[in-house]
Image (tube, rainbow, N blue to C red):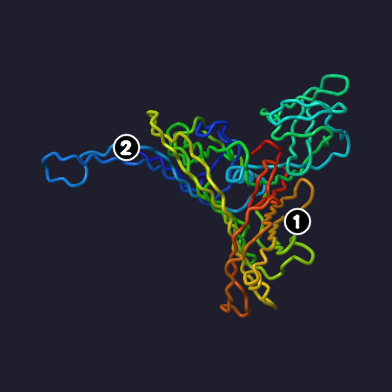
Amino acid sequence: MSTPITYASTQQFVGIAAEAVQGTAVAMTATQLLTTFTPGDTPSWLKDQSWRGSMGTDAFAHIQGTKIAGISLGGPVYGDTLGFWLRNILGDVSVVGTPTGSGATTLAASAAAGATSFQATATIPNGTLLQVGTGATAEVVTTGTPTGSGPFVIPITTPTGGLLYAHASSQALTPVTGPYTYAWSLLNSNGGQPASHTLTHKLGTTATVGARSYPGFCMSQMNFTFNAESELFSWTGQGTSYPSAPASVAPTANPTGILPIASWQTKVGIGGPASGGTLVNTVTDGEIDITRELLPIFTATGSQLPYIIQRGGVAVTGKLNFGAVSDESALLYMLNNTKPQVQIVCSNGLSGANLISIQIDIQVAAFTAATPDTSKAAVGYQDSFETDFNTTNAGGSGGMSPIKVSVTCNVPPGSF
């Protein structure tokens, strides 16, 4: 008797890549380090229950209807791959880098969104990582070979789609390097539909390639959690994709060398930043929950697959637990309806290219519940809040957003 072929579940891994067209699978470009990945293809079933003169009450045939897949996933937060998930559920991003200290200039004329070149007052060397603009519309591009004698025409080699935002004449052009800070907010332009991603699950069982791909993945939920006493800063999520299919090529794991961050390195600010007089020293644990409406839309086109997985509105809620309190501040947030700013910062405390920092900004937090907690030796409170849409947390696409999540890491722009 021959030895059966089996596959060890400990060797599984998950890859991810952004799609150009929702539902068109692409090979993975990055490995996601997860502790949970539970996919499930869910075709609908149409029953033939027409009478046939037999004592049947259920089905004389099962006919397959439309197909989608649902996925639950999560694990520790890794700052250098978190951007994939934030791009998927929120969509709007600005990017700033660390100035190199030389070569800065300005735009010689305005530049439109989508432009694949721009005019600069001074020349810029080929291959320069260049930050265009500042604030909510800041973005980083890679330049091509300049032409002209002043003003100089500077082509953009990456991203291939050109500028994400419009920029006025005289805006700053700054050569940069890492680390970079990505600020993710709710996308409100161009239909408000963020990028979708293909997820690749390597299990070993799929013939030839050993992996299945889940194209068109769209997130419906992303929850951050921290517990200073006992946990890593972590996340869980859920979403919907097109049905799975064998991956186009056999994937290879390339895990990051960046480590996750212990929750005790998290700081919470209420009524201001997580520093100075608004740093709160009594929060023991908490969570931030981002939810997004999803609607797979099926049309009469001769296909079982969705025509589109439509993104709808976003809502953000949170919980903060306070331990060993010395006053009623946690209760008064609710009773007085002060709706303070909440900021949560989790950093590995390193510097330069090794810095990883995740900063969650909620400008308007409406505390809706505050319950005394006497289950432990010291009195505490268990608070819940909902967020209000506001312009402070909005990004370059305008409108309003209930949250902004900024991630500092050394991953080059265009990777997510």
Q: Are marks 1 and 2 in contact (CB under 8 Å)?
A: no
User: What count of labels does the image hold?
Assistant: 2
Residue 15 in the image: above or below residue 331 = above
Q: Badge 2 local density, few (<14 within 10 Å), some, or many (20+)?
A: few
In the image, taking residue 414 as reference, residue 62 lies left or right, namely left
Quarter of the image where the N terminus is located: top left
In the image, taking residue 406 as reference, residue 318 lies left or right, namely left
Q: Inspect this view and state whether residue 242 appears.
A: yes
**Residue 77 location (% of width, % of height):** 62, 52
Which residue sits at x=40%, y=40%? 5
In the image, taking residue 4 as reference, residue 177 lies left or right, namely right
Name the amino acid type tagged 1.
Answer: Gly
Which residue sits at x=47%, y=36%? 210
Q: Which mark is residue 64?
A: 2
**Residue 102 location (% of width, % of height):** 88, 36
**Residue 373 location (% of width, % of height):** 58, 76
* Mark 1 and mark 2: Cα distance apart in space: 53 Å
- Residue wearing tag 1: 349
Numbered disc in front, either 1 or 2: 2
**Circle 2: element type:** strand
In this rendered view, identify the residue nearer to me: 288 or 375.
288
- The answer to which image quadrant residue 251 occupies is top right
**Residue 110 location (% of width, % of height):** 79, 30
Name the amino acid type tagged 2.
Answer: Gln
Name of the residue lying farthest toward the top: 148
- The answer to which image quadrant residue 112 occupies is top right
Sequence order check, earlier mark of 1 and 2: 2
Q: Inspect this view and state whether residue 74 appears.
A: no
Q: Which mark is residue 209?
A: none
In the image, taking residue 54 as reference, residue 355 lies left or right, namely right
Which residue sits at x=63%, y=73%? 331
Residue 351 in the image: above or below residue 304 = below
